[in-house]
Structure formats: structure tokens, C-alpha cells
Amino acid sequence: MTENILKDKTYKFAIRSINLYKYLCDKKREFVMSKQVLRSGTSMGALVREAEFAQSKADFINKMSVALKEANETRYWIDLLKETNYINLEMYESIKADCEEILKLLVSTVKTAKNNLNK
């Protein structure tokens, strides 16, 4: 069940990342950090989807671990965008909350999968 929630949330987050990218490029004329948040923010969901058909438990753990790294990177770019005033506090708090929820889900998924691997 957690995987379906994670799949849904990362997909919706990818859409938010794409929309943030378009906003930053069109309205703020920012092209470097926006590209980074686009890449990392969309790759989380792609990795979760890849993990659905992992070749082994170890492959599943690897894909989810990489998704976790991408989520953490995304959080970094979101923090920078806020601190450099490219996004306002309201935008920041909203997308940060979504990103942190995904981070928590991924941490839990990776921990559970690692525990199950050792059984």
C-alpha cells in the first residue's frame, strides 16, 4: 500500500516540479536551479516506477535509495530557491511539505526493504 501512495505522491510531485520549472523560467528568468529541481524532482517518481519491476530485492532497495537521494537533492534546490527569493514563503512551504513527506516515505520504504532482505 505504501508503494502505491509513494507512486502517486512522486508522480504528483513531478508535475509540481515541471510547473515550478516553467514558472521559474517564464516569470523569474532563472534557468540553472530550475533545471536542477526539474531533473531531481521528476526523477524520484521515475525511480519509484522502475522499482516496481525490480529484478531483485537488492535492485528494489537500490532504486528506492537513489530516489531518496534525489528527494534530498530536490529539497536542497527548493531551499536555495527560497533563500535567493526566486520563490516566496508560501510556495516554499507548500512544495517543501510535499518533498518532506516523500522523503519520509522513502526512508521508511528503504528501511523496511533492508530489514526484509536480512530475514
Image: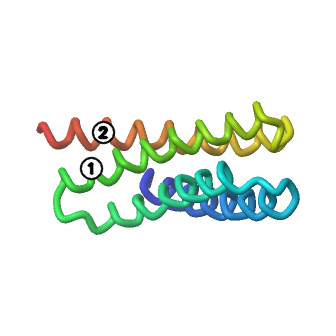
User: How far separated are the C-alphas under marks 2 and 1?
Assistant: 13 Å
Q: Residue 11 lies in what quarter of the image? A: bottom right
Residue that label 2 marks: 112
Q: Amino acid at mark 1?
A: Asn
| Number of numbered discs on residues | 2
Mark 1 sits on what residue? 62
Q: Secondary structure at mark 1?
A: helix
The percent position of residue 9, horizontal first and vertical second, equals: 58, 55
* Amino acid residing under circle 2: Thr
Name the residue nearer the viewer: 86 or 118: 86
**What is the secondary structure assignment of the residue under circle 2?**
helix
The reply, left or right, for residue 68 in relation to residue 29 is left
Q: Could you tell me which residue is drawn at 23 percent across and 39 percent down?
A: 114
**x and y, in percent, of residue 117 in the image:** 16, 43
Residue at the spot 81% in from the left edge and 43% down from the top edge: 86
Picture layout, residue 73 above or below residue 42? above
Residue at the spot 51% in from the left edge and 55% down from the top edge = 5
Picture quarter with the C terminus: top left
Residue at 84 percent across and 35 percent down: it is 89
